[in-house]
Amino acid sequence: MSLDKKEHIINVAIELFAEKGFEGTSIRELAIRADVNIAMVNYYFGSKDKLFEALIEYKASYMRERLEEIVNDKDKSDIEKIDAVIETYVNRILSQHNYHRLIHQELMLQQREFVHSGIIKLFSINLQIIKSIIEDGMEKKIFKRVDPELTVASLTGTINQVMLSKSMCCILLNQACDVNPYTDENFQNRLINHLKQLMRSQLLNY
């Protein structure tokens, strides 16, 4: 039960930080939105800075566990593992676009070094897992000799580009701006299929 309450506070914090920014959100406001008392927030996290650290670790650890499952799946070929990575990233990021926006605000502004370095550290672990799939495929000569780091950047960079803003995404997709692409299943499938085609063209020896 306590874990559920902790997760609830983290999820409410993501909403508020995305809406008002880290500096613009108070612990009191967070407690009111989460329908808990301030003492409970302090009990779980100690401070707003520690809450942000816990938030990042909580989200990154889920993705890390999922990526490790994919890497260790003996029934999947190397390209099927890349496909699974794409599906996992797109589904996760589109379903949590507020969190994605929050993280990129922090990366761009670099106002808090402890937050910035923490994000980079956790993200780099996950990106190294994707890189290991590519390198394994190259070693088996299933994949072409490519630049693994920039291939990972091409994959994640495409997702980041369409997530920068809803309006920008609509322009890229030539859609009316009254459509929310992040909740549109057709857009989600379109993005997944595009990335799969992109990675297959980049990686596979035909």
Image: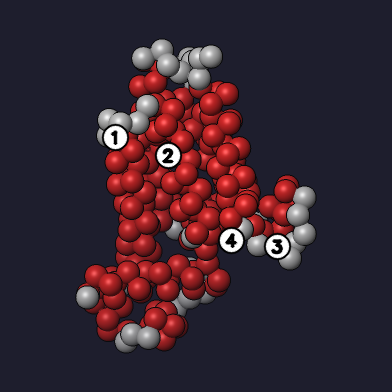
Query: Disc 3 or 2, which lies upstream in sequence?
Result: 2
2 and 1 marks in contact (CB < 8 Å): yes
Left or right for 82, reference 196: left
Residue under label 3? 179
Q: Nearer the viewer, residue 196 or 43?
A: 196
Image coords of residue 205 (percent x, y): 51, 14
Q: Which mark is residue 84?
A: 2
Left or right for 171, reference 61: right
- Residue 126 vertical position relative to residue 8 in the rendered view, above or below: above
Q: What is the distance, in whole Å, between disc 4 and disc 1 at their CAs?
A: 29 Å
Q: Nearer the viewer, residue 47 or 197?
A: 197
Q: Residues within 10 Å of mark 2 (few under 14, many from 20)?
A: some
Q: Residues within 10 Å of mark 1 (few under 14, many from 20)?
A: few
Residue under label 1? 73
Residue drawn at 58 percent across, 31 percent down = 197
Q: Residues within 10 Å of mark 4 (few under 14, many from 20)?
A: few
Residue under label 4? 183
Say whether residue 12 is visible: yes
Q: Quadrant of the N terminus?
A: bottom left
Residue drawn at 52 percent across, 67 percent down = 18
Q: What is the distance, in whole Å, between disc 3 and disc 1 at their CAs?
A: 37 Å
Q: Amino acid at mark 3?
A: Val
Q: What is the distance, in whole Å, between disc 2 and disc 1 at their CAs?
A: 11 Å
Q: Secondary structure at mark 1?
A: loop
- Residue 196 vertical position relative to residue 160 in the rendered view, above or below: above
Q: Secondary structure at mark 2?
A: helix
